[in-house]
Image: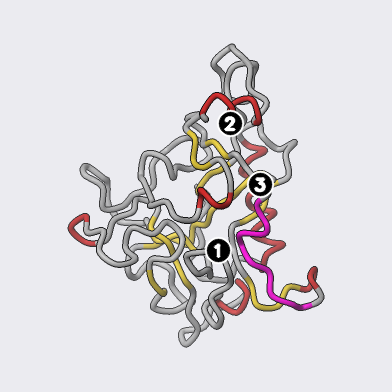
């Protein structure tokens, strides 16, 4: 399966990411952060993904933020689900580790600090053993576990800084307090709600989100 995924990713045999033997970067957690849930909507978040990818030499691919919205201007003001924005896979991280072969394989998996890394291959601070502080493993998604929009929990489609509006986050490391994986705490995309969209830090966040190459 891994060999097939490599072939599908256009890999060769020189061992470098995107080169003849390494799979191309197809997934990362943003190194860029946001104090609030206002990311400039989907367009602003996508632009951040594209900019960060370009900074590591992967800007020729089309990048999309893994975010759901209830009213998408580019979709007739209908809902857009994060799962429908990211292509069909496979996706590899900056360390050439397979994240998932396809959408069906992606959504049931748990977060993992060694896999859900940023565009430079760096781990996101979390609850993993030896992690530096502060905890920042809350990753904005606005999504249910299956990648569909979580109604009323998208920080007003990623334009809000309100204290009364909320969003949904996943855990990039797959852990809750004391490395608990109980309930939804292991979920990479639907662990719990934010306290508000005015400040992404409470509960362990920094306004990061996931980016996928289509």
Magenta stretch: give its range: 77-86
Which circle's residue, 1 or 3, is located before the other in the chain? 3
Q: Is residue 109 shown in magenta?
A: no
Picture coordinates of residue 174, whole percent (x, y): 33, 53
Q: CA distance from mark 2 to mark 1?
A: 22 Å
- Please state which of residues 210 and 202 is positioned toward the viewer in this rendering: 210
Residue at 63% x, 40% y is 53
Picture coordinates of residue 124, whole percent (x, y): 39, 47
Question: Dot 2 lies on which element?
Answer: helix
Picture coordinates of residue 177, whole percent (x, y): 22, 61
Total numbered labels placed on residues in the image: 3
Residue under numbered circle 2: 5
Residue under numbered circle 3: 88
Please tell me in which quadrant of the rendered image residue 90 appears: top right
- Please state which of residues 210 and 75 is positioned toward the viewer in this rendering: 75
Q: Is residue 80 shown in magenta?
A: yes
Q: How many other residues sit within 10 Å of disc 2, few (<14), some (14-19) or many (≥20)? A: some
Residue found farthest to the top: 14
Residue at 51% x, 50% y is 106
Which circle's residue, 3 or 2, is located before the other in the chain? 2
Which circle's residue, 2 or 1, is located before the other in the chain? 2
Please, is residue 213 above or below residue 197 in the view?
above
Residue 22 shown left or right of residue 190 in the figure: right
State the quadrant of the C terminus.
top right
Residue under numbered circle 1: 147
């Amino acid at each position: 399966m891994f060999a097939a995924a490599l072939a599908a990713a256009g890999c060769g045999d020189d061992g470098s990411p995107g080169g003849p033997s390494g799979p191309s970067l197809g997934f990362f957690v943003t190194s860029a952060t946001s104090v609030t849930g206002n990311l400039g909507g989907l367009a602003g978040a996508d632009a951040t993904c594209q900019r960060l990818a370009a900074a590591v030499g992967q800007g020729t691919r089309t990048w999309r933020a893994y975010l759901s919205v209830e009213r998408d201007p580019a979709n007739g003001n209908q809902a857009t689900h994060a799962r429908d924005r990211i292509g069909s896979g496979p996706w590899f991280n900056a360390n050439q580790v397979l994240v998932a072969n396809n959408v069906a394989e992606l959504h049931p998996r748990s977060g993992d600090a060694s896999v859900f890394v940023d565009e430079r291959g760096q781990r996101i601070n979390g609850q993993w053993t030896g992690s530096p502080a502060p905890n920042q493993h809350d990753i904005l998604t606005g999504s249910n576990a299956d990648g569909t929009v979580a109604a009323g929990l998208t920080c007003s489609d990623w334009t809000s800084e309100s204290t009364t509006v909320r969003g949904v986050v996943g855990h990039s490391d797959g852990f809750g307090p004391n490395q608990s994986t109980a309930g939804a705490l292991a979920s990479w995309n639907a662990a719990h709600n934010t306290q508000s969209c005015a400040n992404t830090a409470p509960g362990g966040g920094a306004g990061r989100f996931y980016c996928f190459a289509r």
